[in-house]
Image: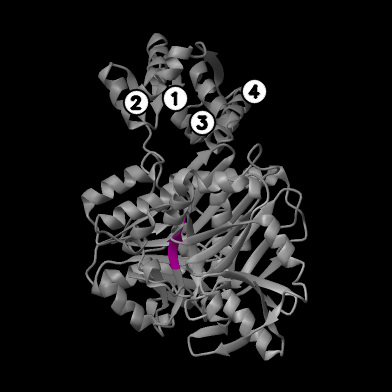
């Protein structure tokens, strides 16, 4: 009997199975060259399917040498046009033609190939992909027990395992003998065969030297050159399945999740227990009559059969999102959200009204929010994410409530500086911990507890102002923040005209953009002032520290004039005397704070007219 196998049965090893069972012994096996071309291409791209197929060819060659079969190769490698048309079935057509020319049995595990072959009048045998339950292999039995979270195998290294649960993990060597590449290749082949033939397994990804397999509750990553510098197998499984009741703050979270669809980010470092919490939330939401779906790449959440798990449609999560919007789930769990495209898909679905729970890596709770900033418009952030749950060592350590308001940010005092602000509040205490807002061209994430001194705001303001001035001024520039809406810019005297512009046009645009009043002064004058006041010119002044202001009494005759302010010999600022002969500085500004500190230390405040 003449037999022409296609690529599908070569990859899954079904031909040698039939020969060893005696069914095809004595047959003439004809391998089309296009099958070799496909296997070679897959192997060169590092795909395990290609390596499995080439191993099958070697086994067939061995059967020929034993006299069980005759083996031949026929046809030519596909042309460039045929390769480009391969997705449309051109390669399968070449295989059918070889079967037809040889009056041979076409052997396939591809249902489309079988149907077309029969329609063309070929003698076809369709081998339905096996779904028998098979043992994983001795290595999983040997290495995995109820306490093992993950197994790590690498050629030239001793096998190691992570043992325990999140928060109580230890690494142990589980065998003294080092793994070899040959051993790992055999294990990888066994894993893939089991995944293809088990009803509880599938190959999630196979390209470029990396293969991801899901086998029951175990996720296995196989890496090989050129993707990695050596052969490696990593197998991970969940060691704990918990309910939401097992977490601190479970009742508060339940109420928040159940009241309406939310936008939630579950954040934490790798291995902190984010996915375990996501699974617990999914199971809870299911009991609340919500329809739940997941978006995963790869799929490894352990959820009930009622929850459908989706991956990227043809590798694209954007296409998966389009399908889900037609399915209309109440909640979708997105595991995991890392890239800009992931955050954009998450935001698009959330703004469409779908409750979204995203799993993302972050070292702190606020870092999860910062990963979103810049990827979507700032004003949309609270509509996309209103809750952040930070997990550490399988415990909920922090929950943030994200809200939006218009206010003067903490640390600023002028009412005309009010702007949209994202408030990040502790969910338990409702105490604000961070504020997020735009300042010039920057987005500021400011800890509220640090804003009383205003120093972080000033440092940021100086950088932003210097960047603006550099568009007009060449050379050295120094900035002095006088208050939350007033600064002095010191620039080279030759650059002042360029900075001011015709009729003050340039400086007016900068002031409008920054929302601050800018006093332009020559740099040389400031350098002279920094050297300290001469004794003949310096005059000590009285300082009055009141509830909201620091008042420096000068002289009514100096009203409207500017004076240089010093603490001992240290220059502080250049200020204008008010109509009542005094300089009034609002508390909370840097100059006022410095004056208060120095007066308390017994230093003398002086002015130079």
Q: Earlier in the sequence, mark 3 or mark 1?
A: 1
Location of residue 59 in the rendering, given as x and y in whole percent from the top left corner: 60, 30
Regarding residue 270, the answer to whether it shows in the image is no
Q: Residue furthest toward the top? A: 101
Write the residue at 48% across / 14% down: 78
**Mark 2 vs mark 3, CA separation in Å:** 22 Å
Task: Identify the residue position indicated by label 4 in the image.
Answer: 65
Camera-nearest residue between 473 and 87: 473
- For disc 1, the neighbor class at 10 Å (few under 14, some 14 to 19, many from 20) is many
Q: Which residues are magenta?
A: 436-440
Q: Quadrant of residue 555?
A: bottom right
Q: Is residue 437 left or right of residue 323?
A: right
Give the position of the N terminus as an image quadrant: top left
Q: Would you say the magenta stretch is mainly helix, strand or loop?
A: strand
Write the residue at 63% across / 66% down: 162
- For disc 3, the neighbor class at 10 Å (few under 14, some 14 to 19, many from 20) is some
Task: Identify the residue position indicated by label 2 in the image.
Answer: 113
Query: What color scheme is it?
Result: one colour
């Amino acid at each position: 009997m003449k037999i022409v196998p296609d690529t599908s049965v070569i990859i899954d090893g079904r031909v040698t199975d039939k020969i060893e069972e005696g069914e095809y012994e004595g047959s003439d096996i004809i391998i089309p060259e296009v099958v070799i071309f496909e296997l070679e291409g897959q192997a060169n791209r590092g795909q395990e399917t290609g390596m499995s197929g080439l191993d099958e060819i070697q086994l067939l060659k061995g059967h020929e040498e034993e006299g069980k079969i005759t083996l031949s190769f026929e046809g030519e490698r596909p042309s460039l046009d045929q390769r480009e048309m391969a997705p449309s079935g051109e390669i399968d057509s070449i295989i059918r033609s070889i079967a037809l020319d040889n009056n041979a049995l076409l052997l396939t595990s591809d249902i489309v190939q079988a149907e077309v072959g029969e329609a063309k009048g070929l003698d076809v045998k369709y081998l339905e992909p096996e779904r028998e339950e098979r043992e994983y292999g001795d290595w999983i039995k040997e290495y995995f027990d109820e306490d093992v979270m993950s197994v790590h195998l690498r050629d030239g290294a001793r096998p190691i395992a992570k043992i325990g649960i999140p928060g109580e993990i230890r690494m142990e060597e589980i065998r003294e003998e080092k793994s070899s590449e040959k051993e790992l290749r055999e294990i990888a082949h066994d894993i893939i065969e089991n995944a293809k033939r088990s009803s509880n397994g599938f190959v999630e990804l196979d390209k470029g030297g990396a293969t991801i397999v899901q086998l029951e509750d175990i996720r296995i990553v196989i890496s090989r050159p050129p993707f990695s510098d050596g052969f490696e197998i990593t197998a991970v499984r969940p060691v704990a399945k918990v309910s939401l009741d097992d977490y601190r703050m479970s009742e508060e979270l339940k109420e928040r999740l159940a009241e309406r669809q939310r936008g939630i980010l579950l954040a934490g470092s790798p291995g902190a227990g984010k996915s375990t919490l996501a699974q617990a939330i999914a199971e809870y939401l299911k009991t609340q009559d919500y329809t739940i779906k997941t978006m995963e790449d790869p799929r490894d959440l352990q959820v009930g059969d009622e929850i459908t798990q989706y991956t990227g449609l043809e590798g694209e999560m954007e296409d998966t999102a389009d399908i889900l919007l037609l399915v209309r789930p109440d909640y979708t769990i997105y595991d995991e959200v890392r890239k800009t495209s992931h955050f954009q898909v998450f935001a698009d679905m959330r703004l469409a009204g779908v409750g979204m729970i995203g799993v993302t890596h972050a070292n702190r709770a606020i870092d999860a929010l910062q990963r979103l900033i810049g990827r979507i418009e700032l004003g949309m952030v609270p509509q996309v994410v209103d809750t952040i749950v930070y997990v550490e060592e399988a415990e909920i350590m922090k929950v943030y409530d994200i809200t939006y308001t218009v206010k003067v940010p903490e640390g600023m005092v002028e009412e005309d500086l009010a702007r949209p602000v994202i408030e990040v509040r502790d969910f338990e205490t409702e105490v604000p911990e961070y504020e997020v807002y735009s300042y010039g061209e920057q987005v500021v994430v400011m800890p509220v507890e640090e804003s009383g001194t205003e120093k972080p705001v000033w440092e940021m303001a100086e950088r932003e102002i210097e960047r603006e001035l550099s568009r007009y001024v060449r050379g050295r520039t120094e900035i002095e923040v006088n208050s939350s809406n007033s600064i002095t810019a010191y620039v080279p005297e030759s650059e002042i005209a360029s900075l001011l512009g015709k009729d003050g046009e340039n400086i007016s645009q900068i002031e409008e953009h920054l929302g601050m009043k800018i006093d332009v002064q020559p740099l040389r004058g400031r350098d002279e002032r920094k050297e300290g006041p001469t004794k003949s010119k310096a005059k000590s002044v009285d300082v009055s520290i009141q509830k909201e202001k620091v008042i420096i009494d000068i002289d009514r005759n100096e009203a409207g004039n500017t004076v240089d302010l010093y603490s001992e010999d240290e220059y502080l600022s250049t200020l204008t005397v008010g109509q009542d002969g005094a300089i009034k500085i609002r508390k909370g500004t840097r100059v006022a704070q410095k004056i208060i500190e120095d007066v308390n230390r017994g230093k003398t405040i002086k002015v130079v007219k």
